[in-house]
Image (cartoon, rainbow, N blue to C red):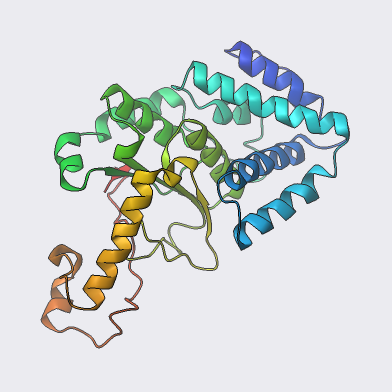
Amino acid sequence: MARPIRFRQESQTQFYKQFSSLCNNKSTWEVWTDFIAMAAQAISNAFDREGPTHDERERQYISTIKRYSKAEQEVFSTLLAIIVEALDRDPDQDFLGEMFMGLDLGNHWKGQFFTPYDICRMMSEITITDLEDRIEKKGWVGIHDPCCGAGALLIAARNTMVRNKRGFREALYVAQDIDRTAALMCYIQLSLLGCAGYVVVGNSLTDPLTGPSPLLLTPSPQHEIWLMPALYDEVWCARIQWERVKLALESLGVMEAPQEAIPQKAAQSPPKKDPIQPEPTPLIEAAGGQLSLF
């Protein structure tokens, strides 16, 4: 178990005490990854209630929880409750990222170090600009982090949106990370903060997201997609449905695709291809930084 440390908040101390009780016969890393995976699976399956994704995550959850005693299983529920209460009390923090570093888990095998939240807040204030113009165009703005870690940058972006009096229906949060545990930490926190969007487990450099639009993904077999609960909201469901209708109309020639989405060379000499199955293209162009708007 990691050496005892002094935490900034009482909720962090409570979390540490409860978490430590699970580490008598298992390593800190094993308990942490089990907790993060089960918390993410519980949140996901509360909304995605049928289909192969639900069934697989339910199977994984049961397989993991069975390795713990009845008393230990109750501790996991307490840990999640502490996170919920902490983020509800103060949304302007990276609770799981701070606990991860406080437990000295960053050096487990990848040498991870999460950016301090105050820096993330400064970066979000610099990046989240021109909201009026961006939202006026399509009703929402996309916020992307291709190397999300525990989600501190996107949490900061969410709070910048709130300070600008913008709600969850006005921003789509897209996160990706090669490390599954880190990506699920991001998923848990953004979900509990009421963000709409999705988190992808995968390499954003060698295997970026593709699809006809950020609301219509074409995931590869290497991708693991986690939809945030707020994305099931009726407004976002309507937007997703409209994207499907637009794609169908474009494939039939009834509606023209936006010209800016067609590269100049392709427009001059269009290749022969099936209009119903467009070639995969990156959903979000790199903007030269970790946090970007689209």
Q: Quadrant of residue 156?
A: top left
Does residue 213 appear anywhere in the picture?
A: no
Between 209 and 251, the residue placed more toward the observer is 251
- Residue at point 28% right, 48% down? 288
Between 242 and 24, the residue placed more toward the observer is 242
Q: Quadrant of residue 22?
A: top right
- Residue at point 13% right, 66% down? 259
Q: Quadrant of residue 34?
A: top right
Residue 277, image x, y percentages: 35, 78
Q: Is residue 149 left or right of residue 39?
A: left
Vertical side of 44 occupied by 82: above or below: above
Residue 55, image x, y percentages: 67, 57
Does residue 284 appear anywhere in the picture?
A: yes
Vertical side of 123 occupied by 247: above or below: below
- Residue at point 32% right, 79% down? 276
Residue 52, image x, y percentages: 62, 62
- Residue at point 77% right, 27% down? 75
Q: Quadrant of the N terminus?
A: top right
